[in-house]
């Protein structure tokens, strides 16, 4: 795991990129990164994502309160969701949650995410579903939420929004970027009114394995794709929000 200073800068970059790509909901969603000792970094409740910097991120303890002096509060729903995932998934160093238009639209559909395009195939049989229980303010919901997430890289919160996890902030962001794109494409395809075409399950699974870096020996390998994409996104963050690392 990177040191805390580096994690702060990278998480702040993710907040600015989420804002840049239009995946925000005023002050009401959250992205977190695990720190050693049952702590994690999360956004200061009340700030827009465009205002978040490495230095104003809040360190939260296991009881949901800041462990350092800060003028900022912590979103209670953010603590419920993120503390649950961090505690249950050792590999989930970063947790990213959104309330986007397309994500909420797909979350309201009985069929959930459909295998309609290459972007959605990254999540073929690799996304969980959690039924809506109201605003996430009840600690008892945490057990059910993590059970529904299971070992998946993504969770669709029915009637609520989207969630991705990653071993790094970059992985969680890229997963959300493509999950969001998949939802946008699905809503656009459904609005056309025609018959939707989906690849057969065998092809869907093959593509999902390719996109997860599990290609067969017959495929050309592209092991650097996500690292290259994340490096490019960090350069973008430096251009559009040079103050994020402060």
Image (spheres, rainbow, N blue to C red):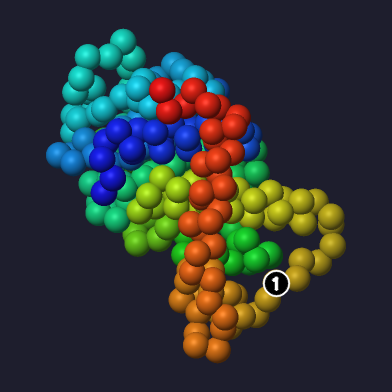
Residue at 68% across / 64% down in the picture? Answer: 117
Residue at 45% across / 48% down in the picture? Answer: 170
**As drawn, which residue projects farthest toward the bottom?**
218
Up-down: is 225 above or below 210? above
In percent of width and height, residue 194 lies at 84, 62
Residue 71 at least partly seen: yes
Describe the element under mark 1 as helix, strand or loop: loop
Mark 1, other Cα within 10 Å: few <14 / some 14–19 / many ≥20: few
Quadrant where the C terminus sits is: top left
Residue at 18% across / 33% down in the picture? Answer: 62
Up-down: is 169 above or below 237? below
**As drawn, which residue projects farthest toward the top?**
71
In percent of width and height, residue 234 lies at 51, 41
Quarter holding residue 103: top right
Residue at 34% across / 59% down in the picture? Answer: 150
Residue 183 at least partly seen: no
Q: Which residue is mark 1?
A: 198
Q: Is residue 215 left or right of residue 77?
A: right
Quarter holding residue 58: top left
């Amino acid at each position: 795991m990177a040191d805390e200073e580096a994690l702060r800068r990278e998480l702040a970059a993710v907040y600015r990129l989420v804002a840049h790509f239009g995946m925000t909901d005023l002050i009401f969603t959250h992205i977190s990164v695990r720190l050693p000792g049952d702590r994690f970094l999360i956004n200061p409740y009340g700030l827009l994502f465009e205002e978040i910097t490495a230095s104003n991120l809040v360190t939260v303890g296991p009881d949901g309160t800041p462990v350092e002096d800060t003028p900022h509060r912590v979103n209670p729903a953010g603590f419920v969701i993120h503390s649950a995932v961090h505690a249950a998934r050792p590999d989930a160093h970063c947790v990213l949650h959104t309330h986007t238009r397309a994500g909420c639209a797909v979350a309201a559909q009985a069929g959930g995410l459909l295998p309609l395009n290459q972007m959605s195939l990254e999540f073929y049989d690799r996304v969980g579903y959690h039924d809506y229980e109201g605003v996430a303010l009840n600690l008892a919901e945490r057990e059910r939420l993590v059970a529904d997430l299971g070992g998946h890289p993504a969770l669709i919160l029915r009637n609520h929004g989207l969630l991705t996890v990653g071993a790094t902030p970059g992985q969680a962001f890229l997963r959300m970027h493509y999950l969001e794109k998949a939802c946008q494409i699905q809503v656009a395809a459904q609005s056309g009114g025609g018959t939707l075409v989906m690849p057969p399950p065998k092809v869907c699974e093959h593509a999902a394995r390719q996109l997860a870096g599990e290609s067969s020996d017959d495929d050309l390998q592209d092991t650097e794709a996500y690292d290259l994409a994340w490096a490019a996104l960090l350069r973008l963050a430096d251009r559009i929000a040079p103050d994020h690392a402060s």
